[in-house]
Amino acid sequence: MPSHTCRTLLAATPEQAYDYLSTPARWHEWHAASLGTEPDAPRSLESGASFEEDIRAAGFRRRLRWQVLAAQRPALWEAVATMDDGSRLRLRYDFAAAGGLTQFTRTLDYQLRPLWLRVIDAVAGSRRIRRETATAMRALQRHFAQRTPGA
C-alpha cells in the first residue's frame, strides 16, 4: 500500500490549524486535487461524519466517499475514503505545538484496486502525487502566513 507522509510548519496554533484542515469543504482552497465536497459543511467534521469529494489526482478525476474515523481536537484527524472501483484511501492529519507554530503532518495511504491504476501509479502516478502534495503544502503555509494573527 503506497504511503505519502509530509510535514510542514504552519504559522498557527494547533487549534487553528486543526479547525481549518478538518473542514473538508475548505480543502479546495489549498489542495488543487480537491474539486469540492458534498455536503459543503463550513465546519470541522467530527468522528462518524461522512461526505463525498470530487478530486483530480495524478491526472484522473475520481469521486471519494469519506468517513471520519477520529477527530481529537487539536491533535489528530483521520478519515477513510472508498471509490466505486474498490480503491481505498486513509488520510491522517497530526498537529503538534512547535514554539508558537504548528508542526503539521499529513499521511496519505492508498490501495488501488484496478490493476491498470496500480501500474500507472508505479510508473508515474506516485511521483506526481508527491509533487501535487508538495505544492499543496506550500499553499497551506501561504494561507496561514497571510492570516491576521488571532483570526
Image (cartoon, helix red, strand yellow):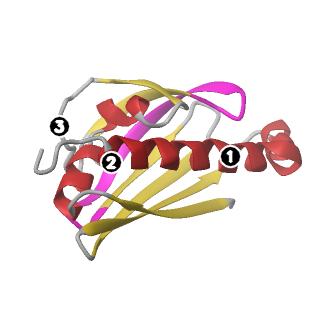
Q: Is residue 140 above or below residue 29?
A: below
Q: CA distance from mark 2 to mark 1?
A: 21 Å
Residue 22 pos. (x, y %):
28, 47
Residue 32 pos. (x, y %):
53, 31
Q: Amino acid at mark 2?
A: Ala
First in sequence, mark 2 or 1: give its number: 1
* Pick the front one: 67 or 2: 2
According to the picture, the residue beneath numbered tag 1 turns out to be 131
Q: Amino acid at mark 1?
A: Arg
Task: From the viewer's perspective, tell me whether residue 44 is left or right of residue 108.
Answer: left
According to the picture, the residue beneath numbered tag 3 turns out to be 43
Element marked by disc 3? loop
Element marked by disc 1? helix
Q: CA distance from mark 3 to mark 2?
A: 21 Å
Q: Amino acid at mark 3?
A: Arg
**Where are the magenta residues, as a range?**
56-76
Q: Residue furthest bottom?
A: 99
According to the picture, the residue beneath numbered tag 2 turns out to be 145
Q: Residue at x 40, y 43 (%)?
A: 142
Q: Quadrant of the N terminus?
A: bottom right
Q: CB atoms at circles 2 and 1 under 8 Å apart?
A: no
Front disc: 3 or 2 = 2
